[in-house]
Amino acid sequence: MSETPKSHGRKAIRPSLKPRELMTDRPSLARAWTAQVITLFPEAFPGVLGQSLTGKALQEGKWQLDTVGLRDFGEGKHRNVDDTPAGGGAGMVLRADVMGRALDHARRRIPPAAPILYLSPRGRRFDQSVARDLAQTPGVTLICGRFEGLDQRVLDHYGIAEISLGDFVLTGGEIAAQAMLDATIRLLPGVLGNAASTEDESFSHGLLEHPQYTRPAQWQGLDIPDVLLSGHHGEIDKWRRAQSEALTRARRPDLWEAYQRSRDADGAE
């Protein structure tokens, strides 16, 4: 069996047609948050995670990426990873024995406290609270689904939770994995550089973020609201809160209802 890529970090980022250039073999970083991805397409990583702030943080060793190519654990000469559904039906299903071998191999390379998540449209919806929780762990193992899904016995045997990016279906879990990792990695210490920026953004207080403005003061006949130029921070905070509440009430009634319940509970205490 060929050796799968090791954990990666602390390597200079250069423009390249080879997206996995960040990921040459190297020892794991003992205290770095580990993003482990089991996928049929390891060459898709780091993808956008190798750019901008997440790419800089990968270079600096604030997190590390460990891809596990599922095909390396496949059956037979052709490394088959799937088979027809038991009971009949369209499509193919990822085999339990193949995924089990990949998981056993992968979990030796990540702290036991790191959860295992299977990217699936039937899972719990990923949101900011999930990202915050994951950022408090030593890392995560993400299983990228393909075809009609994964043999249920794997989920049952390993106690794997299912997680969904939203109420739609993708051809595989790789895009969803990168989105979830981006949302989590940016919450790790030192990644954004300014911790306050994560405190005022959308969802941090159960509300959508207020509108933002910057120079020039007038553009296309539209002015920055006077209150933002007043220098009165108390009034600015009130305006921003009112804007956040109005936007949330209009655009996300589900969030607004949860926010109201939370405020009622706080008042009851």
Image: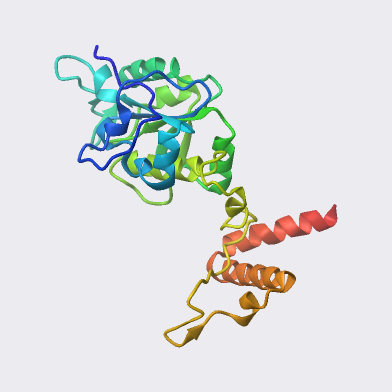
Viewer-side residue, 121 vs 204:
204
Q: Say left or right for 134 vs 79.
A: right
Residue at image position (62%, 72%) is 243
Residue 164 in sight from this viewpoint = no
Farthest left residue in view: 77
Position in image of residue 38 (x %, y %):
35, 28
Position in image of residue 212 (x %, y %):
53, 69
Based on the displayed image, in which of its 4 quarters is residue 90 positioned?
Answer: top left
Q: Say left or right for 104 vs 83.
A: right
Position in image of residue 193 (x %, y %):
54, 46
Residue at image position (55%, 37%) is 135
Viewer-side residue, 220 vs 146:
220
* Number of numbered callouts drawn: 0
Position in image of residue 68 (x %, y %):
33, 24
User: Which quadrant, please, contains the N terminus?
Assistant: top left
Viewer-side residue, 208 vs 6:
6
Residue at image position (28%, 40%) is 14
Based on the displayed image, in which of its 4 quarters is residue 220 positioned?
Answer: bottom left
